[in-house]
Image (cartoon, helix red, strand yellow):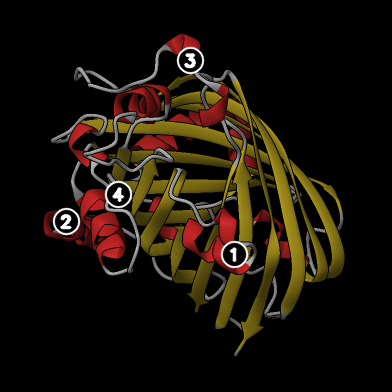
Amino acid sequence: MNKAIKLLILVMVLALNNKAQVSTSDIHRVGLVVDQDYFMKFVKPSLNRDLNYTMGAALPAFQYSKMAEKGWVYAPHRFLSKIFLGKSYKNHELVDAGIFLANTTFTPDYLGNLTDPGSLYKRNNDRPFASLNFIGTSVGLANATGDGLFTLSLNVGAIGLNVSNWVQTTIHEGRKGSPIPYGWEDQISIGGEPTVLLAGKKDWLLLGKADGRGYFQLSSNAELRAGYYTSTGIGLNTRIGLLDTRNWMVNTLPLGNATKRLATQKNLSELYLMGGVKANAWIYNALLMGQFKANKYEMSFSELRKGTLDWNIGVGGKIPFSTKKALRLSAMAVGRSPEFKTVSEFERWHSWVNLQAYYEW
């Protein structure tokens, strides 16, 4: 874990050393993103269950658009963006560049019991234990009218490390009556295996303004992913309330965000409800099916659900302190439909809470 943090710091320093001269119209942003199903207990106690996507965190999440203009860290992003956008690349402006260290954790409903006679049946028919640790980088380019955004993301990391095992076990040992997760010794790619994800995403503002004060926005998006997730998705996002409409590009889905260059010196406060829905089509999911190593428990292609649905609903806001400085906060309930099909008792929807906090300057 310490090596991963040192690597992140090194990458961030190299990226910042290659940036161009700072412009007064650029936003820096640093923050924390947390996904955790434990907080669902405050909505309904029965929803606090360690199953499917259990927890995740991105720390630190740093964003500054100038990082992507020069330097080797974002060279693949610039190259691939030109390929995806073609001739229209020249009509797009760089508005976002981000880097973060993240962990995501996936567990079955059954956490393991060494004396349970039904253990083998449960382990064979539920999802396997799995974890992912990665360094994520992304670049966002907006069109000339400000109502379209192309985002290219590249995640490099490892599946099967012991970070999630240690975190989850420590949490459960500290909670009286909480079951100890015994299944991590059979997680996907146990011992560690390198992995990568490349994703391209396009957002369009359908309704509402793209600058100034507004009260309603509706946007759509389409995404292609290749790597440890090989899939595609289409979705809708909305924001309703007191809006700084330039921030329609802020994505409401977990572990994803976007910043934007300031077009004016106004820094408007915000308070709004937000929500989104996304339909996904799947070909491959390494956190269910494994990669190169043989795994004791893993799903087959036939057991992978080819279609899933994500939803989220929550509240967000921005508190400005000056023309550029602000605190941005959001809290969302997020849900996901069943990702595999084995026995009906193990196929379920799952929900968790996503919390995001950013400081801008």
Q: CA distance from mark 3 to mark 4?
A: 43 Å
Q: CA distance from mark 4 to mark 2?
A: 26 Å
Circle 2 sits on which residue?
1
Tag 2: Cα neighbours inside 10 Å, few (<14), some, or many (≥20)? Answer: few
**Residue drawn at (38%, 32%) of the image:** 197
Amino acid at dot 4: Gly
Amino acid at dot 2: Met
Q: CA distance from mark 1 to mark 2?
A: 33 Å
**Residue drawn at (58%, 35%) of the image:** 348
Q: CA distance from mark 3 to mark 2?
A: 33 Å
Q: Earlier in the sequence, mark 4 or mark 2?
A: 2
* Mark carried by residue 261: 1
3 and 4 marks in contact (CB < 8 Å)? no
Q: Is residue 88 left or right of residue 175?
A: right
Marks 3 and 2: which is nearer the front?
3
Q: Earlier in the sequence, mark 1 or mark 2?
A: 2
Circle 3 sits on which residue?
303
* Mark carried by residue 71: 4
